[in-house]
Image: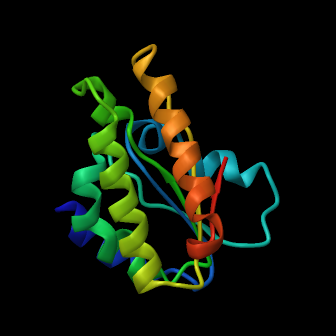
Amino acid sequence: MSIKKKYSFLNKLVKRNGIVLLGSTSLDEPAVNELLQGFPMSQHVYNRSISGLTIADAEKYLEQCVYELFPSRVIINLGEEDLKYCDSVTQLIEQYRWLLYKIHVSMPKCQLVVTTVSGKEGLCENFNEELKKLAEEKSKEMNISLY
């Protein structure tokens, strides 16, 4: 079953206004649902992370991984896969900016939370600093925060 079909099937069971986790390998591999059971949450949390997902490829999964769930908050953890094969963060940050814009335009009331990533030493710190600047720049305009 393809990822899109899998999530479209699961999305029939979700409750609106929950929290969506959209990330790559580090969010897809751990048993997030089991971890969440140990912490009382007032909102439902749906993990729509995909191993190996890059910032550029995330856009083609937005329908099934975000929009169909009508979340109140999306926590985004992307960039770790990109940093493995990249020498410059400028293009990655522009791709991230576009992804945030696409989500914001489709869901203007949704809070977007971007999280820092780990990866190549030096390059990762640069990426996280630029990500922080992006979140600060767009914080009010797009309801974005950095965690």
Residue 12 visible, this orientation: no
Closer to the camera in the image, 70 or 92: 92
Q: Does 72 sit left or right of 43 as displayed?
A: left
Which of the image's four quarters has the N terminus? bottom left
Residue visible at 48% across and 84% down?
107
Residue visible at 45% across and 25% down?
124
Q: Does 23 sit left or right of 129 as displayed?
A: left
Closer to the camera in the image, 119 or 135: 135
- Looking at the rendering, which quadrant does residue 37 occupy? bottom right
Give the image location of residue 113, x and y in percent.
60, 58
Residue 28 visible, this orientation: yes
Give the image location of residue 99, x and y in percent.
35, 63
Q: Can you say whether 29 is above or below 37 in the image? A: above
Closer to the camera in the image, 74 or 108: 108
Give the image location of residue 60, x and y in percent.
21, 66
Q: Can you say whether 111 is above or below 1 in the image? A: below
Residue visible at 58% across and 44% down?
132
Residue visible at 58% across and 58% down?
137
Give the image location of residue 119, x and y in percent.
43, 22
